[in-house]
Image: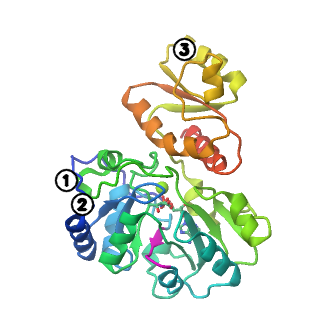
Amino acid sequence: MTAAPIDVPSAGPSPIAPDEAGISSAARALREGRLVVFPTETVYGLGASGLDAAALDRLFLAKGRPLDNPLILHVASPESARDLYRTFPDEAVRLASAFWPGPLTLVLSRDPKVPDAVTCGLDTVAVRVPSHPIARALLVAAGVPIAAPSANLSGRPSPTRVEDARADLGDRVAVYLDGGPSPLGVESTVIGLAGDAAVLLRPGGLAREAIEEVLGRKLLLPAPEEPARSPGMKYRHYAPRARVHVAPEGEILSRVAALEGAGRRVAIVASAESIARGILGRCPGAREDGEAWARMLYSLLRDLDAEGVDDIVVEEVPERGVGAAVMNRLRKAAQGG
Ligand code: TXA
Ligand code: MG
């Protein structure tokens, strides 16, 4: 189920500084049912008033988001988060006190006050308490939960700079708050605690290993026959216009040669180790530095698109810590479709 296809919009309003005046005009726009782009510690969010069904409709339309892909509600405090759930089990208490505010989203059974437009009819809701000071100031000023997917057109890389969001969403947004580059650069980790198991619904900016340490047990992966447990993960995502290929270090040059032999313009994204061995390409950081790769990934993909390359060959990184989220996004970007 997909929303109607949409054209790229015309240029929207200029981004504004997140000072007192900026925050209060963004909060007013939200309360009036309009859309606001704001920074979080993960990526930029496209915010709508989370309990306003008409504003939520506008949000799905602006992104071209499939109507069965539920939203994350953002709130200012763990107490406000608990208010949106029906129950808050002991494991949720432990994760919330260890990681909120921060890049963790908890999916639990929902309180009846949460609109169907947020959950797409599921009986669970995803909530997080962001740590970014501008997101927090906006939440306090707005006084309502803010529903916020990443501020990209559906299927495109998430924005880590305000101009990336504006390039995608233009005049569909009333206010763009400029908070500079996103500190983490990859979306929150989504954990499902609605049943007996603790499920890793989406790897993200908080390492799985850190969550397992607090829980004292392993996270499960959603069963493949249960895509509805993690609706967003079944869609092609995070993809630039250029085709993305993921390759281990030893196969980068042969992949590039084959593509160039077919007349294509190819860019390489590789680790510091590979660059030191003579591979020419863009370098987010050392192979083990998942945080650095996360910070650079989406902006690199967008910049290479702007340069007009046909293909981007990206080196595989180890799936440890935040590196797992980097590889998850790269594989999805590479899926094609
Ligand atoms: O870091 C982030 O989480 C960013 C910033 C803006 O906070 N937001 C974000 O939202 O990445 P979005 O909409 O791009 O991704 C939300 C993810 C999707 O994979 C969606 O399927 C999942 O959360 N999700 C939301 N509600 C859910 C639910 N009730 N059950 C399972 N998964 C859910
Ligand atoms: Mg997204």
Q: Earlier in the sequence, mark 3 or mark 2?
A: 2
Q: Secondary structure at mark 1?
A: loop
Q: Look at label 2 and name its amino acid.
A: Val
At 70% from the left and 22% from the top, the residue drawn is 251
* Residue position marked by numbered label 1 in the rendering: 13
Q: Secondary structure at mark 3?
A: helix
At 49% from the left and 72% from the top, the residue drawn is 129
Within the image, what quadrant is residue 174 found in?
bottom left
Name the side, left or right, on which 237 lies relative to 18.
Answer: right
* Residue position marked by numbered label 2 in the rendering: 175
* The stretch drawn in magenta includes residue 73: yes
Disc 1 residue crowd, few under 14, some 14–19, many 20+, Cα 10 Å: some
Q: Is residue 110 visible?
A: yes
Which dot, 1 or 3, sits closer to the camera? Answer: 1
At 76% from the left and 64% from the top, the residue drawn is 220
Compared to residue 68, the image places residue 204 above or below, namely above
Compared to residue 232, the image places residue 95 above or below, namely below
Q: Which residues are magenta?
A: 71-77
Q: Earlier in the sequence, mark 1 or mark 3?
A: 1
Q: Secondary structure at mark 2?
A: strand
Check whether the beta carbons of the residues at disc 3 and disc 2 lie within 8 A of each other: no
Compared to residue 179, the image places residue 245 above or below, namely above
Check whether the beta carbons of the residues at disc 1 and disc 2 lie within 8 A of each other: yes
Give coordinates of residue 323: x percent, y percent. 65, 46
| Image mark for residue 260 | 3
Which dot, 3 or 2, sits closer to the camera? Answer: 2
